[in-house]
Amino acid sequence: MDATVIPPRTDIRGDLRRIADMVSAQARVLDVGCGDGALLDLLTREKGVDGRGMELGMDGVRECVSRGLSVIQGDADTDLKDYPSDAFDYVILSQTLQATRDPRGVLLQMLRIGRRVIVSFPNFGYWRVRLALLLTGRMPVTDRLGFQWWETPNIHFCTIADFTALCAQLGGVTVERSAILDHAGRQLTSDATTWRANWSGEQGIFLLRRD
Amino acid sequence: MITPPAYTDSSGATAAPALGGLPGQRMVLGADRPMPLDGGGQLGPFTVAYQTYGTLNADKSNAVLVCHALTGDQYVADRHPITGKPGWWEMLVGPGKPVDTDRFFVICSNVIGGCMGSTGPHDVNPATGQPYAIDFPVITIGDMVRAQALLIDALGIDQLFCVIGGSMGGMQVLQWAVAYPERVFAAVPIATAARHSAQNIAFHEVGRQAIMADPEWRDGAYQQAGTNPARGLAVARMAAHITYLSEAALHRKFGRNLQSRQAITFGFDADFQVESYLRYQGASFVDRFDANSYLYITRAMDYFDLAAEHGGQLAQAFRVGGKGTPVRFCLASFSSDWLFPTSESRAVVHALNAVAANVSFVEIETDKGHDAFLLDEPEFHQVMRGFINGCADHRGLKRRA
């Protein structure tokens, strides 16, 4: 078998970098849907966090644990209830909200487990998505959302406006920070409440705080 | 494709295997003060036979305890003194291996109740001058771990860097983490459970009844009688061996292939390769294992229930001083293991999550069943390497030069 040590990552996705900027050093962090562990790795190395991860896919879990990260196989929809309240400073859900069966329930669980919650998701209100549906009459397939409708794991799309409305409806939740990113991962604005943010942002990142 | 060796029936009474004079290290424990047992009695003085590999560092922070399974022993990375086979976990333990003996000081001891040098039912009871046989006290996983802790004390080690083991070894790992959380930095319970299931107790009972039904067992006093319940023990091993494999693995290895013949014989010879294989497994096992030890160790596994002392709440077992356990865990299970299925590991993970413990968990895809933890599973070994190296970094242990 191959006994070599897995090389450290060099390419960090722009949105992960921005999420990492929202996390304070030495914090306790749970990354829900942590994938191959890129964000946990970044947070551990650069912020010295006490990081844990949960990932649905076993390939990702094995990759993470092989890299020395504390990750378990688990499902955001069913397994967050096992965690005690206030166990973490930050609970992160990166590009996973739209793949959950009960996004609102998952958000509430995250807000119970951690005082602060960071959520990033693709914006279905992005102009390219809107135009694709309007002009072709077909479900949009973009670089970031590269699935056909019948195979996509993304079952609960929302727009930035939808998400801010849900946060308001939940009550007791403050949007502390937000970042609206363009196609290249550059920040367009930190104000998620404008019509322009919902039109030109390809993805949104929100830092929520339980009041 | 494995072609099993042809089985030859060695009929007639044979003496129990002579298991004295085995190579390795010995430590006499409980001499000043006998060790209390969960069953109410006490044991002492008693002997623990163990092997070590690598070098203990100056601050004694690099010790790894490997816990063996039901029929395992302390020869984790040595040629076995009786069978001549390589150590049972050489895939995982050795120079440059995931449990790197160039970096860690590895200890593996024979469990008490065992038959490879640690005190067990085949040893002479000082009170009677006769072998203990079934007068040996019934021991538990907790007792095995208590004895290991005394050994670790005697070696001058306060905290183990890692405790690792599969199957019954995994039970010991869990017991270590719960009984001595401050003495374990990282725990790796593999293909195991926090309690023995009804189905597993049932299989063990079949094995025990096979041994006790053998007329050579003589109510346990076969050593005095100069006999050996080898047939009963072999049947116990055959039944157990099936539970270590999977249907897919049995089919892949043997299918319905015939053993050294062109057609079925319309008799009760080992027509099928799988029969011959099982008979060989049974027959070779009795050369290296003591029947009474098999009774005692299977019983210890049956009695294991980590949550029992905590009101049935497994999570409570992992609470230390009102907080979650400080031990770092990595659990691993194997997809085709039906003896200790993934659901058992997941139950432990859920309990650890409930106290926000530091836990990793992977299920390895394989068709090799429970035995997979002993076999060449590169993905499993890579996960072990990553977890152990990550923990060593956190513990401040130097990387290999």
Image (cartoon, coloured by chain):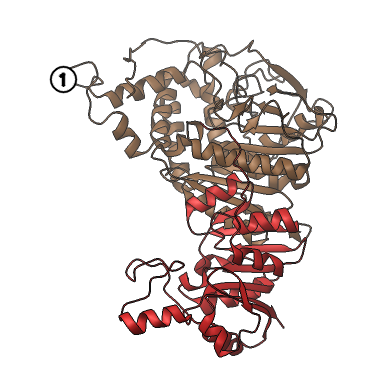
Chain colours: A red, B brown
* Residue A159 appears in view: yes
Quadrant of the rendering where the N terminus of chain B is positioned:
top left
Q: Is residue A170 above or below residue B312?
A: below
Place of residue B145 in the rendered image (x, y in percent of width and height, measured from the top left)? 69, 37
Chain that bears disc 1: B
Quadrant of the rendering where the C terminus of chain B is positioned:
top right
Place of residue B31 in the rendered image (x, y in percent of width and height, measured from the top left)? 81, 25
Most foreground residue, B214 or A183: A183
Q: In this figure, what is the number of numbered marks? A: 1
In the figure, is residue B353 to the left or right of B261? right
Most foreground residue, B298 or A204: A204
In the figure, is residue A84 to the left or right of B90? right
Q: What residue would you read off at disc 1?
A: B265
Among the 4 quarters of the image, the one containing residue B10: top left
> Are there few (<14), some (14-19), or many (20+) residues within 10 Å of tag 1?
few
Q: What amino acid is at disc 1?
A: Thr
Element at label 1: loop
> Which residue: 51% across, 53% down?
A60
> Which residue: 75% across, 60% down?
B323
* Residue B167 appears in view: no
Among the 4 quarters of the image, the one containing residue A151: bottom left
> Which residue: 76% across, 33% down?
B62
Place of residue B151 in the rendered image (x, y in percent of width and height, measured from the top left)? 76, 29
